[in-house]
Image (tube, rainbow, N blue to C red):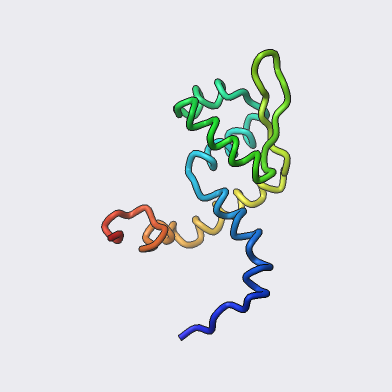
């Protein structure tokens, strides 16, 4: 049996957990990857590039903005979205390294994996 996490550790780790939850959606990761690779983009650019609905892109950009990971600047009648934390690139690269090293074993995780055969 594992020991319960101390309250102080829970409080201390809460911001990191929130960061990972903000990265926990494939659409948000795709947006971050696109902004990382090609630089600032308008919503319409992301819609076309990622083949997502405008409402989906806007919703996820609002989440990423709320987390302080992206911001925007006016560009004509649109807004140009950009990364505010270049270190997020390092997080994505590190995640890809972990996935490669584990053979993407996390995909088999019964709680968070992509396999539906393990879910109830």
Q: Position of residue 55 (x, y in %)?
A: 49, 28
Residue beneath the point at 49% across and 46% down: 25
Furthest-top residue in this view: 76
13 shown above or below 93: below
The one nearer the camera, 4 or 51, is 4
Q: Position of residue 26 (x, y in %)?
A: 48, 43
53 shown above or below 91: above
Quadrant in which the N terminus appears: bottom left
Side of 35 relative to 98 (left or right):
right
Residue beneath the point at 59% across and 60% down: 17
Side of 112 relative to 41 (left or right):
left
The one nearer the camera, 72 or 101, is 72
40 shown above or below 103: above
Q: Position of residue 70 (x, y in %)?
A: 67, 38
Residue beneath the point at 69% across and 43% down: 68
Q: Quadrant of residue 115?
A: bottom left
Residue beneath the point at 44% across and 57% down: 104
């Amino acid at each position: 049996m594992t020991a319960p996490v101390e309250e102080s550790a829970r409080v201390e780790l809460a911001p990191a957990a929130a960061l990972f939850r903000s990265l926990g959606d494939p659409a948000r990761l795709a947006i971050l990857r696109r902004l990382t690779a090609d630089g600032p983009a308008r919503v319409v650019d992301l819609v076309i590039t990622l083949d997502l609905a405008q409402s989906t892109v806007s919703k996820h950009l609002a989440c990423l903005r709320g987390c302080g990971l992206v911001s925007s600047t006016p560009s004509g009648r649109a807004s140009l979205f950009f990364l505010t934390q270049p270190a997020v690139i390092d997080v994505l690269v590190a995640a890809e390294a972990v996935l490669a090293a584990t053979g993407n074993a996390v995909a088999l995780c019964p709680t968070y994996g992509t396999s539906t055969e393990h879910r109830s």
